[in-house]
Amino acid sequence: MLLLFHALGTKFGELTLKKDPRCPACGDNPTIRTLIDYEDFCGVAPEEVNFKTMQSRLVPNLYIIGDALNIDRPSGGYSLQLCWTTGFVAGSSI
């Protein structure tokens, strides 16, 4: 379950995501049984995002911003800039 927040309307919502039976962590036949490095496993692949709007190419009206993106970059302030910029792009396109 994913918590959604609509800042302009100050409303909360929930999004139920379907479980992927092929998922190596929680699928029908999991191959990952121990904790791994977040950077190696998590994040949405860049090719799944329209960078002009930050909208998912797979799920309509889902915007992917900040550290939810699987983008290799230096840490620190650059991560903050990624969050600010992608948030601005997504907010401007809604």
Image (cartoon, rainbow, N blue to C red):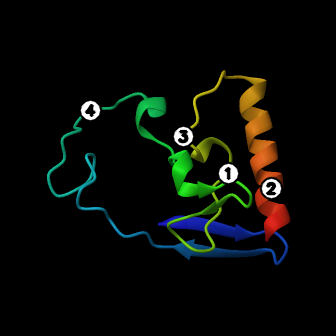
**Disc 2 to disc 1, C-alpha distance:** 9 Å
Where residue 56 sits in the image (x, y, percent)? 58, 63
At x 56%, y 46%, the residue is 46
On screen, residue 39 versus residue 65, left or right, reads left
At x 35%, y 29%, the residue is 36
| Type of amino acid at the residue the image marks with label 2 | Val
| Type of amino acid at the residue the image marks with label 3 | Asn
Question: To which residue does mark 3 refer?
Answer: 70
Q: Residue 9's mark?
A: none
Disc 2 and disc 4 in contact, CB within 8 angstroms: no
Where residue 12 sits in the image (x, y, percent)? 68, 74
Classify 10 Å Cα crowding around label 3: few (below 14), some (14-19), many (20 and above).
Answer: some
Under circle 2, the secondary element is helix
Disc 2 and disc 1 in contact, CB within 8 angstroms: yes
First in sequence, mark 2 or 4: give its number.
4
Question: To which residue does mark 4 refer?
Answer: 34
**Disc 3 to disc 1, C-alpha distance:** 10 Å
Disc 1 and disc 4 in contact, CB within 8 angstroms: no
Q: Nearer the viewer, mark 3 or mark 4?
A: 3
Q: Residue 65's mark?
A: 1
Where residue 93 sits in the image (x, y, percent)? 80, 67
First in sequence, mark 3 or 4: give its number.
4
First in sequence, mark 2 or 1: give its number.
1
Under circle 4, the secondary element is loop
First in sequence, mark 3 or 2: give its number.
3
At x 79%, y 71%, the residue is 94
| Type of amino acid at the residue the image marks with label 4 | Thr
**Disc 3 to disc 4, C-alpha distance:** 21 Å
First in sequence, mark 3 or 1: give its number.
1
**Disc 1 to disc 4, C-alpha distance:** 27 Å
